[in-house]
Amino acid sequence: MKAKKAKLTKQKPSPKKKKQIAKKKQKTQKEKKKNLKTSPSQSIVSQKVSERETSSDVKELLDTVHEYSIGHEIANSVTHGIGGGLSIAGLSILVTMAVLYGDIWHIVSSAIYGATLIILYLASTLYHAIYHTATKKIFKIIDHASIYLLIAGTYTPFTLVSLRENSEWGWYLFAIIWILAFLGVGLLLLFPGKFSGIRVAVYIIMGWLAIFVANDIRGAIGTAGMSWLVAGGLSYTFGVIFYLWDRLPLNHAIWHLFVLCGSICHFFAILFYVIPSHTK
């Protein structure tokens, strides 16, 4: 009996159980083969999808950052590169004239205006000259931010010198214009690519605020000084037509020339009618 029991305990699994075990093994082997067959193809497909996504992302980035041909970008860089050189010379002239014919208000306001001129033209030149996409994207933001700074910088001599000496609006306008400038710069830096409508509205509001104190400015700098100021504003305004005229060859470089003319007009208004205004 004991021998029989020992034999029973060492008995092999029943045929039914063997079939179940065999089926499980076959199933496992099939799954392994399936995985071996499908995983390479899946990886290839996923790789292709990721490549397509990457290429589309790069294309989108190139479309938004590389807006112009290489020749067009060279023209853009040269036009505002000239502006950068003139701005450095202009800052030296303004500060020298302010030291000779003005006081601390003339010196500080001239330095602020000249510095914002240099920042704008330098940022624009580098943005258009650089081709590396990531770097170009950074300088595009800096370029757009510097526009706010230049608008506020241009107001500064008129508010801290001309209006401060002849009107109660000097400090108010100075505060408002720089708050708007920092608002615009903040939106660009903190939310790049967003709130474009608000940012454009800030540009427009800053540019047109001078209308509310036009009579006070005219009384401070005279008709000739006001003519230079208006001429600069008109140059910027007409230049926008070429900025938006995408089909025109070198339209952006032409826009740069109008910007340069506007800056020169405002520079002469400050040099000849703001800095020496207190001696009249």
Image: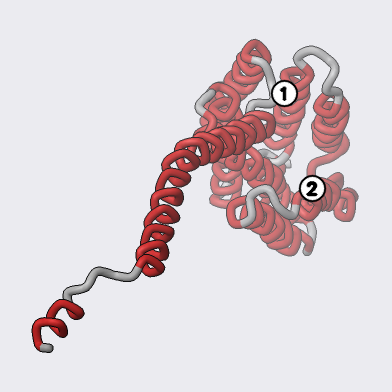
Q: Quadrant of residue 9?
A: bottom left
Helix or strand or loop: what does disc 1 sit on?
helix
Q: Nearer the viewer, mark 1 or mark 2?
A: 2
- Looking at the rendered structure, the kind of residue marked 2 is Val
Residue situated furthest left in the rendering: 3
Q: Which residue is mark 1?
A: 256
Left or right, residue 195 beside residue 55: right
Between 271 and 58, the one nearer to me in the picture: 58
Q: Residue at horizontal 68%, vertical 34%?
A: 64
Q: Residue 137, position in %: x, y? A: 57, 37
Residue situated furthest front in the rendering: 1
Q: In which quadrant of the rendered image does the N terminus lie? A: bottom left
Helix or strand or loop: what does disc 2 sit on?
helix
- Looking at the rendered structure, the kind of residue marked 1 is His
Task: Tell me if I can see residue 165 in this picture.
Answer: no
Q: Which residue is mark 2?
A: 200
Q: Is residue 3 above or below residue 184?
A: below
Q: Residue 243, position in %: x, y? A: 80, 27
Q: Residue at horizontal 86%, vertical 54%?
A: 213
In terms of sequence position, does the residue under pointer 1 or pointer 2 come before the other? 2
Task: Tell me if I can see residue 208 in this picture.
Answer: yes
